[in-house]
């Protein structure tokens, strides 16, 4: 390695220095390991967003209408269980339904089934980027919010839809779904701490190449 300064040429021929420079060149030419590590940090942060129910600001809670709908669905699901159908007393049936409702109320927002949280995975990793995201069709609207237009849902062949009514649920071949406004609940969000960790990871990745 030659260093030029004020007309003087200094030749550096130290094996350790040359090895360090070679390692640095190799690392800056291949940042995929670093990007993969950054992707892991991002996924971990997103999972923590779900557990915290929104960070740094908490997500908007479920509406009363949504909660009532979920509670009714929980009751109907409980009534279809073998345990409920074989219960001999009304008190036992009522207790089974109440337990189902309480279990539903304990579900965190955006984690009713857990599918959305688990769908956030590491995608493409290149030399200068790492992508994470979800392939679920409803993932986008939960992130940014929006309006689901009124539409008609039709059951698949030989199947029926369970439709809520004031007196319980009925089965129909199709149902009209009214317009629904979904609030934004951004879960693909990094915190300042994550950015600090990522910056430290980048420095460490390069420093280890320089040091040895």
Image: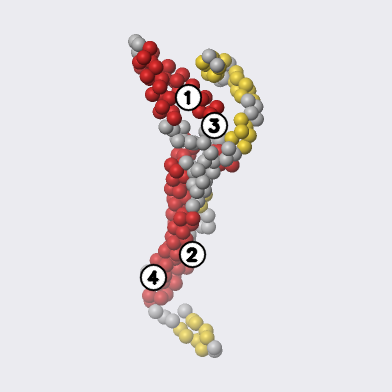
Residue tagged by mark 2? Answer: 28
Which residue lies at the image location 52% right of the left edge and 24% below the top edge?
69
Q: Quadrant of residue 94?
A: top left
Crowd tier of the residue under label 4, counting other residues whose Cα lies within 10 Å: few below 14, some 14–19, many 20 or above: few
**Mark earlier in primary sequence (2, 4):** 2
The front one of 102 and 212 is: 102
Residue 174, position as x, y percentages in the image? 60, 18
Residue tagged by mark 1? Answer: 71
* Mark 1 vs mark 2: in front: 1
64 to 1, vertically: above or below:
above
**Mark earlier in primary sequence (1, 2):** 2
Residue tagged by mark 4? Answer: 211
Which disc is residue 63 wearing? 3
Alpha-carbon span between mark 3 and mark 1: 12 Å
* Mark 3 vs mark 2: in front: 3
Q: Examine the rendering and report whether any part of residue 190 can be seen.
A: yes
Residue 168, position as x, y percentages in the image? 51, 15
The front one of 17 and 98 is: 98
Which residue lies at the image location 44% right of the left edge and 50% below the top edge?
40
**Mark earlier in primary sequence (3, 2):** 2
Quadrant placement of the C terminus = bottom left
- Asked which secondary structure carries label 2, the reply is helix
């Amino acid at each position: 390695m030659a260093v030029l300064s004020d007309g003087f040429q200094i030749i550096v021929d130290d094996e350790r220095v040359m090895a360090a420079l070679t390692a640095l060149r190799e690392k800056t030419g291949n940042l995929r390991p670093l990007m993969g590590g950054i992707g892991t940090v991002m996924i971990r942060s997103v999972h923590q967003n779900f557990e915290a129910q929104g960070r740094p600001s908490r997500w908007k809670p479920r509406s009363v209408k949504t909660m009532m709908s979920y509670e009714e669905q929980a009751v109907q699901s409980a009534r279809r269980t073998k345990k409920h159908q074989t219960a001999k007393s009304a008190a036992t049936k009522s207790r089974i339904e109440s337990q189902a409702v309480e279990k539903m109320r304990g579900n965190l927002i955006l984690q009713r089934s857990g599918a959305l949280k688990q769908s956030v995975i590491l995608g493409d990793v290149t030399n200068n980027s790492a992508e994470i995201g979800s392939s679920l069709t409803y993932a986008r609207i939960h992130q940014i919010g929006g309006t689901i237009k009124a539409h008609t849902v039709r059951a698949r062949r030989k199947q029926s839809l369970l439709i809520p009514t004031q007196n319980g649920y009925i089965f129909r071949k199709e149902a009209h779904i009214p317009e629904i406004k979904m609030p934004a609940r951004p879960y693909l969000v990094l915190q300042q701490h994550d950015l600090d960790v990522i910056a430290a990871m980048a420095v460490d990745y390069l420093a280890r190449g320089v040091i040895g």
